[in-house]
Amino acid sequence: MHPPPPAAAAAAMDFGQNSLFGYMEDLQELTIIERPVRRSLKTPEEIERLTVDEDLSDIERAVYLLSAGQDVQGTSVIANLPFLMRQNPAETLRRVLPKVRCLPRSMRMHTYLPREYGSHYVCPEGVTLWRRTLTGVSNAWLETLLSVIEVLPKETLRHEILNPLVSKAQLSQTVQSRLVSCKILGKLTNKFDAHTIKREILPLVKSLCQDVEYEVRSCMCRQLENIAQGIGTELTKSMVLPELIELSRDEGSSVRLAAFETLVNLLDVFDTDDRSQTILPLVKSFCEKSFKADESILISLSFHLGKLCHGLYGIFTPDQHLRFLEFYKKLCTLGLQQENGHNENQIPPQILEQEKKYISVRKNCAYNFPAMIVFVDPKNFHLELYSTFFCLCHDPEVPVRYTIAICFYEVSKLLNSGVYLIHKELITLLQDESLEVLDALIDHLPEILELMSTGGESSVQENKLSSLPDLIPALTAAEQRAAASLKWRTHEKLLQKYACLPHIISSDQIYYRFLQRMFTIMMTNNVLPVQKAASRTLCIFLRYNRKQEQRHEVIQKLIEQLGQGKSYWNRLRFLDTCEFIIEIFSKSFFCKYFFLPAIELTHDPVANVRMKLCYLLPKVKSTLKIPADKHLLQQLEMCVRKLLCQEKDKDVLAIVKRTVLELDRMEMSMDAFQKKFYEKDLLDQEKEREELLLMEMEQLEKEKQQNDGRPVSDKTFEKKRRDTKTPTTLPKSIPISVPGPSGTSTPSTSKEIKKSKLIRSQSFNNQAFHAKYGNLDKCASKSSTAGYTSSVSGLGKTSVISLPDDSFRTRNASSTPTSFPSNPSLPSTSRGTGNSVDPKSSGSKDTQPRKATLKSRKSNP
């Protein structure tokens, strides 16, 4: 670039001095102004005046500060009045509130009191200020008065408010006085009987509806809804409806708008004749004028379209029905066909204001779209409204697409079996460039996908989403877009909603397209709630996976790359995953695969990991059943005792001691049903039945493929799972499959014997987890030996068993983790692997034995 000419450089320098820093004289003035600021600290005398005796009670301190304190102290007392009223209402009313009334009005307008105490103070104060002068202070008091009218006694209302209201509502009073009178009349109607209302209140209402000032007429018109609810249907038809009709023809646009909105809100009050002969012509007139001469009513009209459709349903003739529908379609595209021909930086203000108005209209149309489906009948959606729905989903403005995304679930429910018509619009909104639109859509994403998969039918044999190949790419792209943004809450919510996918798509699709992504998020994402959401969703994917080989690969990766990971952060996430496993899976599943890897972390070099494990130990113990899991209980007790004896970190040791007491108080669940644990045992047995059913379905699918090459559908599995659900009342002799020594439960039928043999015969894909464990089955197949002779009644009541000291130490030899076939292999993060790559293994998240994030950092002296 060429340097600017000297004149331009001088101008730029002058502009920079003037606009950025100002003139040099201004800078000099700033240095002068700075000196008093430095001297503005309180002097010892001022500090002494602000000091209050600490022995004073709250009431005495408030009285002292209101009497002799400074303004800032009085303001603090006023802000604390609600607390004083709740703590000691009698003394506050007797001693504090009289002092408050003596304060300047500029301070009193900040006073707030609970409604139940309004009759003691708010009513006299508000009415007094209303009678004297209508300043900003009195307006603040009157707003408070309006909020407590409902709890004031009737006699107080009559003498203190209604009687003065007659004079304050006259034309001789100020506009502000008459506006306040309108608001008070709207509140008073529900407090008096019909005779008093007709004789004393309605004449004032009629007078204010015919006031010479349009602000007063508009304000009174908006109070007619409250008045109609208080006087009943007959008086509303004879007294209120004529006034509304007259106000709807008022010369002021704000008055006409108020009349229209009040009519819409009162549709349910009027009968069919009134609606067809009086209100419908008014609505037609509003619709016609909104485009021709009065665009100010467009926003309100578009917002109340749903109420109009509901209130006038069955009254429209076929021709009127068609015209009203065409009017709605026109509003949905309002402003989209216009080309202003202006540069974006040179658009006139009036054009910008008009475009904002049109955006609000289209947004309101999107809000009322479900009501319009009911209006035209869902059967006619494709013919009448699909093109409009398409336009709203592709609207150029985010607020419109955001609103239609919120309504998408309602639209799907209304279409029922015709929900397939909006498959493409679902994909469009999932791929929307705005995360706000995606966030609005995923609130009901599981329900939407369920409707899409079943075609809106409760019983269906095949998944309807097979004809929508773009769904899975759209879901994965939405997650990646959320992950790349700074809106981690949207990312977290989306991952939570993905837990519905096992009921929507096949197990293989989840395994190859989503499971690897969940692992990546757990190991690389920096936001803890997002990691936990991914962990829980992964556990649900694992819960419904129908292939044993895939399940074992996932379990192996969880243990090797998280539980035995080099980064302490990954090991913390493993404990989170264990907590989700306990919640989602059966007790036997956790004991079989995760019990030993979890308690091994009692020897973790990082204090935070041991601390988190201590908090988890009660849940870990709750998964054990006696006597089948006696050997696991003994190992748990041995690990806790080692912690008690060897723990050097004082914070961890304190938590261990509390955990020991909690574990000692816990009652163990037995193999047989117990009355106190009946519901929990019933739920656990149902989980275990479903897990066994998954294995059985896998075997049936293999046999089916061998016979005719056709896989068993997911819907067949769902039907079989429902058919085999545990009944609400079970016989006491039902066998329960639990890990542990053989002979604890006996199958009662030949089918269960066959199932048990099938399960026992399934191998672990010959992949080792740990040098100590050998493979996953060893985690559950360790039986009690002759050395396990101690009692299992509770922690602290059993003798220490004899085991090698290094039985729970971290391994030294690395093992090769199993990777998912369709994805790149994750690097091994096992402790002892030298070449592992872990983004969280450096810095503060290393393997050094020190406390990290859970404990407060202590500065060195």
Image (spheres, rainbow, N blue to C red):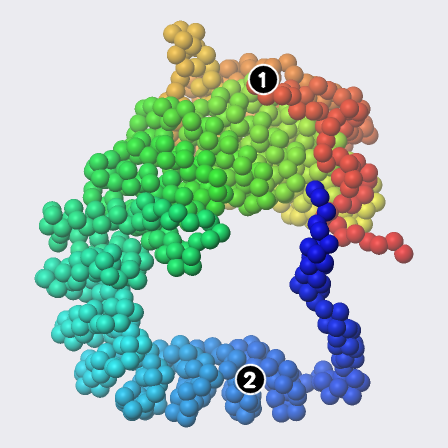
From the image, which quarter does the N terminus lie in?
Answer: top right
Residue at label 2?
A: 107
Residue reaching furthest right?
861
Q: Could you say whether the residue bearing mark 1 is in a helix, strand or loop?
A: loop
Give the number of the disc on residue 87.
none
Inter-mark Cα distance, 1 to 2: 72 Å
Type of amino acid at the residue the image marks with label 2: Met
Q: Nearer the viewer, residue 122 or 659?
A: 122
Q: Nearer the viewer, residue 203 or 284?
A: 284
Relative horizontal placement of residue 44, taking residue 825 as reference (left or right):
right
Residue beneath the point at 70% across and 47% down: 659
The location of residue 477, given as percent across then percent down, is: 51, 32
Residue beneath the point at 45% across and 80% down: 140
The vertical placement of 416 against 65, above or below, is above
Residue 718 shows up from this direction: yes
Crowd tier of the residue under label 1, counting other residues whose Cα lies within 10 Å: few below 14, some 14–19, many 20 or above: few
- Please count the marks in the image: 2
Residue beneath the point at 78% across and 39% down: 843
From the image, which quarter does the C terminus lie in?
Answer: bottom right
The location of residue 91, given as percent across then percent down, is: 55, 87
Q: Nearer the viewer, residue 824 or 850?
A: 824
Type of amino acid at the residue the image marks with label 1: Pro
The vertical placement of 17 against 663, above or below, is below
Q: Nearer the viewer, residue 225 or 158?
A: 225
The location of residue 14, given as percent across then percent down, is: 70, 62
Residue 760 shows up from this direction: no
The location of residue 400, given as percent across then percent down, is: 39, 47
Q: Quadrant of residue 668?
A: top right
The vertical placement of 475 against 188, above or below, is above
Q: Quadrant of residue 32?
A: bottom right
Residue at label 1?
A: 821
